[in-house]
Image: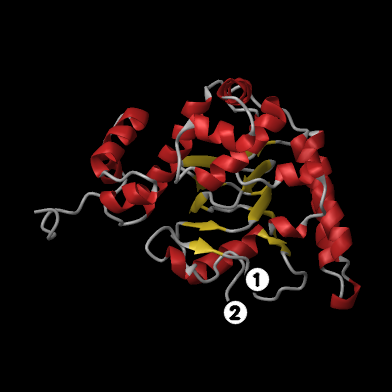
Amino acid sequence: MAPAELGEADPSQSDAIVRLDFNPPVERVPGFEIIDLATLHRRRARRDPDGVHRVDFHTLSLITEGSGEHAVDFVTYPCRPGTLVWVRPGQVQRYVRPGTTNGTHVLFTPSFLPRLDSVDRLVDEWYGPVCRQLGTSADYAVLAALMGQMRAEYDRPDEAVSPDMLRHLLAAALAHIDRLPYHGEQDDPRAGGEVYARFRAELERSYATTRRAAGYAERLGYTVKTLTRACMAATGQPVKHVIDGRVALEAQRLLAHTDEPVAAIARRLGFPESTNFGKFFTRHTGTTPGAFRGSLRPTPPPGSPDGR
């Protein structure tokens, strides 16, 4: 059977970025698995060592030893003891250099968690930073203890494992992460309140079909001014910039990690004409789609068919 992070790709996404569903080798607790990070790296090395993919579940890694690098959506994060990495559904990741890292790796589906307002907000696809450096702080000690309790419960004999215990331990760990401070260079979605949370959830559903701020305001029952105020509080940018930024990110993902023609990517993101998509992409990234894609592809060696 396929390892948890290396399941079968969704056939509907076969012409786009590989998307993996939750599919552990042995599903002891539906929707949940906790393993050593070193175990995950061994699985990857056997199956797809350089694979770029996105997952339909959450992964939470707490590094306890060693060093390495992990890339998520064009940002490479250094990993060392005390690093916390949270990858959410839909984000594109690649283990650039696993190095000697080890630690605790938790995999869970959004539906596994208990139904609590605070938890529902935390597991939204867009919410929060990917990487935090906790070092040897008290926050690190609390999370390490909670993950240790999860691992101890998960490793009990099958009939003795309590999914409810795991749900509540995981919810406590996520609530603790939510209390961690944001650094100055990071957006703080909490500052936008419920308005921003509802807007970002709708944006995740609709970014490929509409880029109109007024359309989002109408769907959510707010004014554009209210959405802009929430976006400014959370990100420092008006609502239209947040919408366009989400579309531009998906465009970068597809250009970097698929071989789809630019015209097909344009249609996928709601642009009937590829020329309009090209202008949009250049305006938001400072480069053309073709140049962006080319900058991420290795230069063919001299003498090869593509590098004469």
Q: Is residue 104 left or right of residue 218?
A: right
Name the residue: 10% across, 57% down.
303
Mark 2 in CB contact with mark 1 (< 8 angstroms): yes
Work out which quarter of the rendered image holds the C terminus and state it: bottom left
Q: Front-most of 208 and 144? A: 208
Q: Label 1 amino acid? A: Pro
Query: What residue is drawn where x is 25% and y is 45%?
Result: 294
Residue type marked 2: Met
In this rendered view, identify the residue nearer to me: 167 or 237. Answer: 237
Horizontal and vertical percent position of residue 130: 60, 41
Residue that label 1 marks: 24
Please state the horizontal and vertical placement of residue 284, each as a whole percent of the image. 37, 30
Please report the residue visible at 55 percent of the width from the left and 47 percent of the height from the top: 205
What element does badge 1 sit on?
Answer: loop
Pick the front one: 240 or 21:
240
**Looking at the image, can residue 130 be seen?**
no
Residue 114: name its quadrant. bottom right
Which quarter shows the N terminus? bottom right
Q: Residues within 10 Å of mark 2 (few under 14, many from 20)?
A: few
Tag 2 secondary structure:
loop
Q: Which residue is label 2 attached to?
A: 1
- Tell me the distance, in whole angstroms, between the alpha carbons under discs 2 and 1: 8 Å
